[in-house]
Amino acid sequence: MQASGGLRGVHVLWMVVGFFTLIIGTDTYFIIKAVNTFPGEQVKNSYVLGLDYNRELEERTRQAELGWTAEAGVVVDGKAALVVRFVDKAQSPVTGLRVDASFFVAGGGRAEHKIALTEDAPGEYRAYLDDALAGRAEFRIAARRGEDSTTLFSASKVAVIP
């Protein structure tokens, strides 16, 4: 008569292999989900932007010479809207600008939304955020005059979309 096999070395081996397979599989799943929802980069071509840093400093100097300031935020008046107010050195509204913005919502994937703001009141520009997810959003705002493609003023703002 033969005694029952009990726990043998081969059983322990398969338990250890199964345990690590489960752990590695779970970690892989969570890493893929995390990278797909937010890859960690603020701009797609960060290396090229780093090489062109002197141009960025020149643009900031030109913008500072204008003396404009901007105030931006998300307001809710039935629907969520991005509102940006521009004033010059004398605190007078800056009118006649073409204002565009792009934003992404943290945790909303890689989708970047682009919107064009219209002037509602002197110096106040607004765009409704119809298709935006609720959450923390980072806005990049650019102002130009008329059909000129040169950006006169740029700013970024982090706000919560309700």
Image (cartoon, helix red, strand yellow):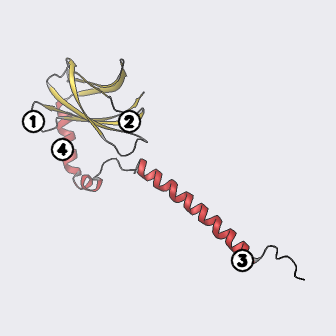
In which quarter of the view is residue 68 placed? top left
Q: Residue furthest front?
A: 1
Is label 4 or label 3 in front?
Answer: 3
Q: Is residue 73 above or below residue 30?
A: above
> For residue 148, which numbered disc appears in the image?
1
**Image coords of residue 142 (percent x, y):** 22, 35
Evaluate if marks 3 and 1 touch, with contact meaning CB atoms under 8 Å apart: no
Tell me the CA gap for discs 2 and 1: 28 Å
Tell me the CA gap for discs 3 and 2: 53 Å
Which amino acid, by three-letter code, is at mark 4?
A: Glu
Evaluate if marks 2 and 1 touch, with contact meaning CB atoms under 8 Å apart: no
**Image coords of residue 53 (percent x, y):** 23, 51
**Image coords of residue 87 (percent x, y):** 22, 22
Residue for badge 2:
137
Q: Is residue 152 left or right of residue 156?
A: left
Graded by Cα atoms within 10 Å as few (under 14), some (14 to 19) or many (20 or more), the crowding at tag 4 reads few
Q: Is residue 17 left or right of residue 153?
A: right
In this view of the protein, which residue sits in the foreground, 98 or 129?
129
In which quarter of the view is residue 125 placed? top left
Q: Residue furthest right?
A: 1
**Image coords of residue 54 (percent x, y):** 20, 50
Q: Earlier in the sequence, mark 2 or mark 1?
A: 2
Local secondary structure at mark 2? strand
Is label 4 or label 1 in front?
Answer: 1
Q: Residue furthest bottom?
A: 1
Residue for badge 3:
10
